[in-house]
Amino acid sequence: MTAMRISKPSTSGRALYTADERRRRDETVWTLVQGILAPVQFLVFLVSLGLILRFLATGEGLFAAQVSIVVKTLTLYAIMITGSIWEKVVFGRYLFARPFFWEDVFSILVLALHTAYLVALFTGALDAGSLMALALAAYVTYVINAGQFLWKLRLARLDQAARAGSSVTLGTGSSLSGSAS
């Protein structure tokens, strides 16, 4: 693989990862951890959303909905902590690295809303309906943030495909000379 930068597909015109960052991303166990935690968190989200909607529609299952939101929040904390470690390993800083700056900014809002839910739940500051409304607000921000990260994953794959394609044609000028890996 060549170390040459390819412009685009990142929206800023810069490659999402430098060659060293890509190597660190591919070598760290934290990439696998994130790859496991993200779909687990999404599954917990779906179950919890169903329980919240059930409670709002029927008035039944408040405790199950509350427990599911706490579990969702704990999975969020886990993915945020391990994601920060991943970001430190790959980019040298725990949060707000150039490629993920806006995703991290929005993640803080997601964390704040989930944490506000926990505070309100454990202090009794809100009634059940208001708690569910707060949880739904937190979940909307989570979905937006997940979309941001899925977009970056797509950009990373496009970037990697562009780099792989360029390494095939850079050699002698003839097509498909050399290895595509």
Image: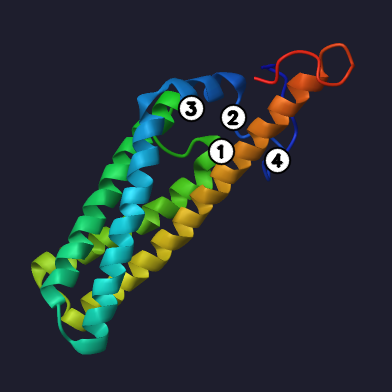
Q: In the image, which disc is placed on residue 91?
A: 3
At x 46%, y 56%, the residue is 145
Q: Nearer the viewer, residue 49 or 82?
A: 49
Q: Earlier in the sequence, mark 3 or mark 4?
A: 4
Disc 1 from disc 3: Cα separation: 9 Å
Q: Are marks 2 and 1 in contact (CB under 8 Å)?
A: yes
Q: Quadrant of the C terminus?
A: top right
Q: In the image, which disc is placed on residue 99?
A: 1
Q: Earlier in the sequence, mark 2 or mark 3?
A: 2
* Res. 62 visible in picture: yes
Q: In the image, which disc is placed on residue 46?
A: none
Q: Nearer the viewer, residue 171 or 92?
A: 171
Is 117 placed above or below 76 here? below
Image location of residue 4, percent across then percent down: 72, 19
Q: How many marks?
A: 4
Disc 2 from disc 3: Cα separation: 9 Å
Q: Nearer the viewer, residue 22 or 14?
A: 22
Q: Which residue is mark 2?
A: 17
Q: Quadrant of the N terminus?
A: top right
Give the residue type at disc 4. Answer: Pro
